[in-house]
Amino acid sequence: MMAKTEIRFSGSGGQGLLLSARILAAAQARQGRFVAQSNAYEPVSRGGLSRSDLVISEGEADFPLARRLDYLLILDAAGLGVSDHLLSPRSLVLADAELVPDPPRGDFATRALPFVETARSLGNPRVTNIVALGTLCALSGVCPPEMLLDRVLAMTPAKFDRLNRDAFAAGLAMAVPEPV
């Protein structure tokens, strides 16, 4: 992992994006890293734009807000456009193939993946965020999968342990490298 990594979770309210960011932040803190998290959302419980940014570093961050994203996860079209100015050639955009029909394209990598469809196939679309978190973990290498899964299970209700384990495993499996 680089000295500093910036990640944005973006989509609509009710998708569990803020929870995903909190889970990843907790896993990073357990590794002794410094993490700054900032959230922005529209004043509706479901639907409006929702995003959470993490700035992860080995030492104290000089600025706690994302300025140049390494990873952008978009789970809904509501999250489109608001992050484009933060993308660079080193960025990786992960977008849901169903809810983000036209993901950002540019001089950065973009992967459209079936996060929602996979969660639905597991029996509950509410674990879309956990599927995506598994994929982000595997493709970015920002955290050992076992440590992140431990935080998922610690920070979500125990009655969903099996479902969350399955969702996380499905996300990891989805992270097949793109052919060159």
Image (tube, grey):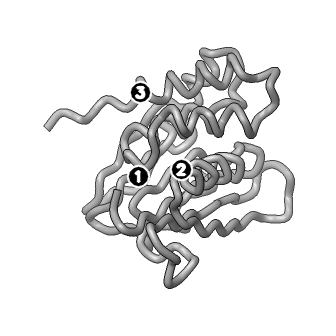
Amino acid, disc 2: Ile
- State if disc 3 and disc 2 touch (CB < 8 Å): no
Amino acid, disc 1: Val
Task: Give the residue at mark 1.
Answer: 93
Q: Is 99 left or right of 42, judged from the image as shown?
A: left
Q: Is 19 left or right of 179, judged from the image as shown?
A: right
Report, in whole angstroms, how far the alpha carbon at label 2 lies from the one at label 3: 16 Å
- Please report whichever mark, 3 or 1, sits nearer to the chain's N-terminal start: 1
Residue 168 vertical placement versus 44 (above, below)? above
**Which quarter of the rendered picture does the N terminus lie within?**
bottom left
Question: What residue appears at the point 47 percent right and 56 percent down from the top-left corner?
Answer: 72
Task: Give the residue at mark 3.
Answer: 174
- The quadrant in which residue 68 appears is bottom left
Q: Element type at marker 3?
A: helix
Question: What residue appears at the point 75 percent right and 51 percent down from the top-left corner?
Answer: 13
Foreground pick, 33 / 43: 33
How many neighbours does mark 1 have within 10 angstroms: few (below 14), some (14-19), or many (20 or more)? many
Amino acid, disc 3: Met
Question: What residue appears at the point 51 percent right and 50 percent down from the top-left corner?
Answer: 73
- The quadrant in which residue 10 appears is bottom right
Residue 2 vertical placement versus 9 (above, below)? below
Question: What residue appears at the point 58 percent right and 54 percent down from the top-left corner?
Answer: 9
> Which mark is nearer the camera, 3 or 1?
3
Task: Give the residue at mark 2.
Answer: 74
Report, in whole angstroms, how far the alpha carbon at label 3 lies from the one at label 1: 15 Å
- State if disc 1 and disc 2 touch (CB < 8 Å): yes
Report, in whole angstroms, how far the alpha carbon at label 2 lies from the one at label 1: 8 Å
